[in-house]
Amino acid sequence: MKNIMFIAPPAAGKGTQADMIVEKYNIPHISTGDILRDIANEDSEMGNYVSEVLSSGGLVKDEITNQLVEQRLSKADCKNGFIIDGFPRNIDQAKIYDNILNKLGYDIGYVFLINIDEKELKKRITGRRICENCKAIYNINNENNIPKIDSTCDICGGRLYQRKDDNIEAFQNRYKLYMEKTKPIIDHYKELGVLYEIDGNHDVKGVFNQIDSIISGDDRT
Ligand code: AMP
């Protein structure tokens, strides 16, 4: 299995796709957003700082995210492949990421770029609900992904919550940041020949099939 990276605007479905890859290929899913949300819940100076940045839709300082990623990738469970989601988010982070991989002896693997219309993203962002227990993702604006019981996780019965930054105001900020800062990363990985473009306007399965046909069609191990 190869290492996998997602580049996608907010609410494009990268978390959902990552979960499906985890289920099929049993590799860890490393989401800097998830790691930072856990830190934001801590009662500390760092927790307060991260919580404030997350609520505004801004970006946490590179020195913090870089360190978190290096620590996480150094763990033994990443040896047979992993999915990184939410990192790198700007070209400086991309260069740091390349260095971290080098240091650990890992290759970049696949970089999946999920392209999706802004209008569709707004619909998804207001409907997204997440299980506070198992982190399963639902969308109440999508009839194929509504929880069976209101506000309750189908899988574990946990309570569903809405992320603080899943509102139109924070979305505009996050989308603007994505367009400005994340797009240059695309050219970086295109040049390295590892970028695969995915049409994210399909349903969850349609997007997964595109990704999976690339992963499973590859015989490099
Ligand atoms: P996500 O779950 O990927 O949408 O990330 C949620 C929020 O976490 C973002 O809006 C940022 O505030 C923060 N965040 C996640 N990844 C990074 C990163 N690589 N660099 C800086 N901030 C990040």
Image: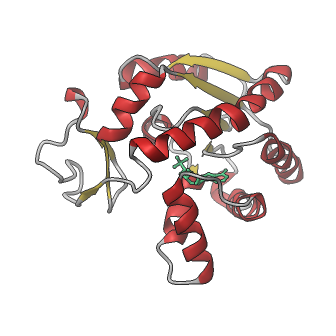
* Residue at left offset 29%, top offset 39%: 127
- Residue 177 is left or right of residue 210, and the answer is right
**Which residue is at the far left?**
149
* Residue at left offset 52%, top offset 67%: 51
| Image quarter in which the N terminus is found | top right
Q: Position of residue 96 (x, y in %)?
A: 84, 49
* Residue at left offset 61%, top offset 82%: 45
**Which residue is at the far front?**
169
Residue 77's place in the image compared with 26, above or below, is below
Which image quadrant for residue 70?
Answer: bottom right
Query: Can residue 35 be seen by looking at this rendering?
Result: no
Q: Position of residue 86 (x, y in %)?
A: 61, 45
Q: Position of residue 166 (x, y in %)?
A: 40, 47
Residue 111 or residue 10, whichever sits in front: 10
Q: How is the image coloured?
A: secondary structure
- Residue 27 is left or right of residue 140, and the answer is right
Q: Position of residue 163 (x, y in %)?
A: 38, 54
Which image quadrant for residue 61?
Answer: bottom right
**Picture mark count:** 0
Residue 161's place in the image compared with 176, above or below, is below
* Residue at left offset 85%, top offset 24%: 192
| Image quarter in which the C terminus is found | top right
Query: Can residue 146 be seen by looking at this rendering?
Result: yes
- Residue 211 is left or right of residue 109, and the answer is left
